[in-house]
Image: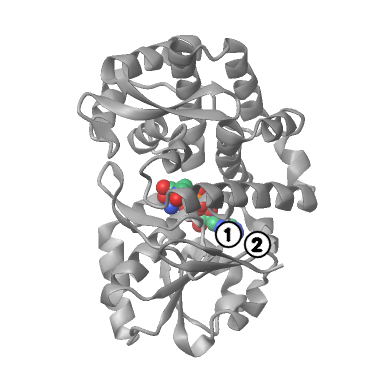
Amino acid sequence: MQYSVTFPSRTTDYHPSASLAHLQQLANVANTIIITDNNVWTQYQTELGHYEAIVVEAGEQSKSIETVQDICKQLAELQAHKTTILVGVGGGMITDLTGFVATIYMRGIAFGFVPTTILAMVDAAIGGKNGVNVGLHKNMLGAIQQPNFIAYDYTMLASLPTQEWSSGFAEIIKYACIGDAALFQQLQATQLQTIMENTNHLQAIIAQCVAHKNKIVLADEHENHIRKTLNFGHTAGHAFETLYTLPHGQAVALGMIVAFIASEQHLQLPKKNRQQLVAILQQFQLPTTIHFEIEAVMSTLKMDKKRKGDSIDFILLSQIGEAVIYPLTFPAIAQALQVFAHEHKA
Ligand SMILES: NC(=O)c1ccc[n+]([C@@H]2O[C@H](COP(=O)([O-])OP(=O)(O)OC[C@H]3O[C@@H](n4cnc5c(N)ncnc54)[C@H](O)[C@@H]3O)[C@@H](O)[C@H]2O)c1
């Protein structure tokens, strides 16, 4: 059933049971340009072939200002104008990139998303954050602009590699940790393979996560307070992601363990919760150990956008389902990383 969410900046129409084959009903062929990556294009060229399309190379390295410039040149060649609609069909790399291009091209044109990874369905496509990386700095350039629509075609998940399913579940586990203890318990009692085979269960979980994120974004679109909680696991996670070129979800999984450790150190979160988290991560085929250099992670963290003087607003847990914004000093972060390195040896 279609519904709309009205953010301070724009209303987004949600189409939770759309079909790529019927995309024309949302974005007419004459006025739309698709932005996608070569993996998604190879799989869905038949369904998308009647649209003008800009295909970028798959992978995080394409989330760059060079790609933005290249896409803008192609848009100009295709005579895209103020009433053109850009539709990003892909994972979070494509939705972040498409949203950014649409926000700056001719000072802003309409855009929509067809998220094709679990991660983009539950997280990246929602909430209007877009942007690109600059060297090692994740999402250094970007803006907040909500898409005009988001359309879900779950059948596209059939071609998604298992590793990408796992990666998406890292964000689902994140939602459970910060705001949904019941979902945390549900995840404890299941595994990736079981959910991959149960479309109804999967769709229910996705809908729950989308509702959770929208509720937070509605309360704080520009991340002045509660939206920061969505960064749970992402501060150390982004450092692992860029330094060791890990997929986003894998890096977030590791970052969540660091955040659990810091929560034990500063908010007395019971250590048994960390063991439960590690078990869930393993059930969803996510990593729980990594070889890393504390100094390298610390120097990346010192360039984090969330840095405030000598500390970073970390997201910690007072209990499962209860997130707390907590300024952690750099020595305190290093301490949590040390425990992680020591107690979770690769
Ligand atoms: N804007 C936000 O709020 C937000 C939130 C979380 C993550 N992100 C960003 O999202 C990005 C990660 O997203 P991702 O994990 O979706 O990565 P991704 O977009 O790189 O996709 C992962 C891989 O899956 C392939 N793929 C995508 N859909 C497919 C399908 N249906 N069938 C077969 N292959 C498919 C892609 O080609 C790619 O190789 C990161 O850049 C991260 O920073 C943004």
| Residue 28 position in % (x across, y down) | 54, 86
Q: Position of residue 21 (x, y in %)?
A: 66, 77
The residue shown at (27%, 40%) is 305
The residue nearer to you, when weighing 257 against 311, is 311
Residue at image coords 74%, 40%: 193
Disc 1 beta carbon < 8 A from ligand 1?
A: yes
Mark 1 vs 2: CB contact within 8 A: yes
Which residue position holds label 1? 116
**Is residue 307 found left or right of 275 in the rendered image?**
left
> Quadrant of the rendered structure where residue 101 is?
bottom left
Compared to residue 268, the image places residue 244 above or below, namely below
Tell me if I can see residue 11 in this picture.
yes
- Identify whether 93 is placed above or below 309: below
On the image, the x and y values in percent for residue 67 come to: 30, 63
For image coordinates 48% across by 90% down, the residue present is 30
Ligand 1 neighbours mark 2 (CB distance < 8 Å): yes
Q: Is residue 243 left or right of residue 153?
A: left
Judging depth in this view, the residue of 180 and 281 nearest the camera is 180
Check residue 156 in the rendering and tell me which mark sits there, or answer none. 2
The Cα atoms of the two marked residues, 1 and 2, are separated by 6 Å
* Residue 345 visible, this orientation: no
Dot 1 alpha-carbon crowd within 10 angstroms: few under 14, some 14 to 19, many 20 or more:
many
